[in-house]
Amino acid sequence: MAKILLNKSNFFHNLELCSKQAGSKDKIAIVLKDNAYGHGLKEISQLANEFGIRKAVVQDVEEANKIKNLFDEILILKVSQNMTYSHNFHITVNDMCEIKQLPINSNVHLKIDTGMHRNGIDPKELEVAIHSIYSNNLNLTGIFTHHRSADTLSSEFFWQKAIFKDIKLKAISICEQLNIDVPNFHSANSNALFRDNNFDEDLCRIGLAAYGYMYKFDLCKNIALKPILSLWTQKMSSRTLKNNQAIGYGGSYIAKEDMEIGTYDIGYGDGFLRVGEHHDKFITKDGFKLLGRVSMDNLTLDCQDDEVCLFDDVKELSKIHNTIYYEILTSLKPSIPKEIV
Ligand SMILES: *Cc1c(COP(=O)(O)O)cnc(C)c1O
C-alpha cells in the first residue's frame, strides 16, 4: 500500500527555527488546514503538541473538533452552520454580519482587510465592529490580517504592515475606552515571519515553513528548512517489456530496448497529480524514471523494487506541474496511511 512517512526530527528542526525567529514557541500557531497541508491532521497535531506548540489554526470546526484536546487555542478561519463550541475555539469574524450570528461568549478574532481584498472587514469599520462584538457579548481575543505578497520583494508587504500597525493603535484605544482586554494582534504567515528580523507581534500563523518549505529564500536569508513528508509506493506487478512495446494510456512511453519494469500502487486518484506527456521529466528520489502517463491508481517505473520513494521534496514536482508547493501537498488524499519516523 502507498504510504506517507513523516520525518519527526525534520519537523522539530523546522519548528525550532520558527520558534527562534518568532522569539518563543508560544508565539507559534501551527496552521493545520486541509489535513495539515496533506501531511495528516492527527499526526501533525500530535507531533506539534509533543514539541510544545500550544496554538493551532484550522479551516473549519470539523477540523477543530478532531484536535481540540491537543491545543490551548484553536483559531477557526471559517464560520460554519451548526458550529459546536469548545472553550479553546476562537472564531474568525470575516464579515460584519457574522457578529450577530455567533453565540454569546464565543471567542472571536476579528479579521481586517488591509489590502488582500479576500476576507475581513474594512479598516474603516474597526470601531463599529469592536463595539458590535462588545455589545453582542462576544470576547474579542484577537485582531489579525493576512499579507497578499509576503513572498514578493515590493512595497506591498510594508504598506499592509503600516495599515495593520495603525489598526493596532486604534484598536487598543477602543478597547481601553470599553474597558475590555486588549486582544492578540497577528499578521504573519511563514514568509512574513522570516522577512521580519524584529518580529514583535503576539503570534504568527505558520504553515509552509513548518512543513519544510519557503518561497524566495533570497528574501528570507538562508533558512535551512527541511521537508518532512515523503511519499512511498508499493509494487503491484512487474513484467519484461520488449523493444518497441509501449506502456499505459496512449502508449506514450515506447521501450527502446528490452527492459524490466514495475507497476506501482499510486496514481492521481490518490493525489499524486497526473503527469501526462511530460512523464520523462519526473524521476523518483532514487533516480528511477516514470514510464508513460500516471493512471488513476497506478504508475509505471523503470524499476522492480518492492517499495519506492516517489519524492521527499516537492520542489521538482511543482516545476513539472507549474504550480505551488501547497497544491502538490494538499492534493494528497487523507486516506493515504501515515507513519512517523
Ligand atoms: C494558510 C494561511 C496561513 C499560513 O500560510 P503559510 O504561507 O503556509 O505559512 C496563515 N494565515 C492564514 C489566514 C492562512 O489562510
Image: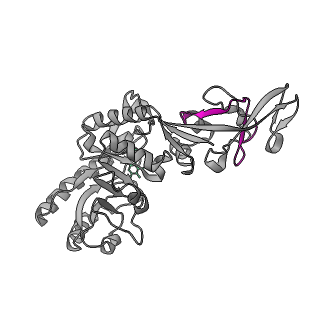
At x 38% / y 54%, what residue is drawn?
67
At x 40% / y 37%, what residue is drawn?
153
Q: Is residue 297 magenta?
A: yes
Give the side of residue 266 with respect to residue 125, left or right: right
At x 35% / y 37%, what residue is drawn?
15
Judge by depth and name the residue closer to the eye, 124 or 104: 104
Total marks shown come to 0
Q: Quadrant of residue 257?
A: top right
Instruction: State whether the magenta stretch is mostly helix, strand or loop.
Output: loop
Give the side of residue 305 with respect to residue 183, left or right: right
- Whether residue 191 appears in this view of the structure is yes
Q: Is 9 located above or below residue 45 in the figure?
A: above
Image location (x, y in percent) of residue 73: 29, 54
The N terminus lies in quadrant? top right
Colour mapping used in the image: one colour
Image location (x, y in percent) of residue 128: 24, 69
Q: Is 24 located above or below residue 159 in the figure?
A: above
Q: Quadrant of residue 190?
A: top left
Q: Is 250 located above or below residue 180 in the figure?
A: above
Residue range corresponding to the magenta coloring: 292-315
Image location (x, y in percent) of residue 198: 24, 36
Judge by depth and name the residue closer to the eye, 88 or 214: 88
- Whether residue 155 appears in this view of the structure is no
Q: Is residue 166 magenta?
A: no
Image location (x, y in percent) of residue 277: 74, 40
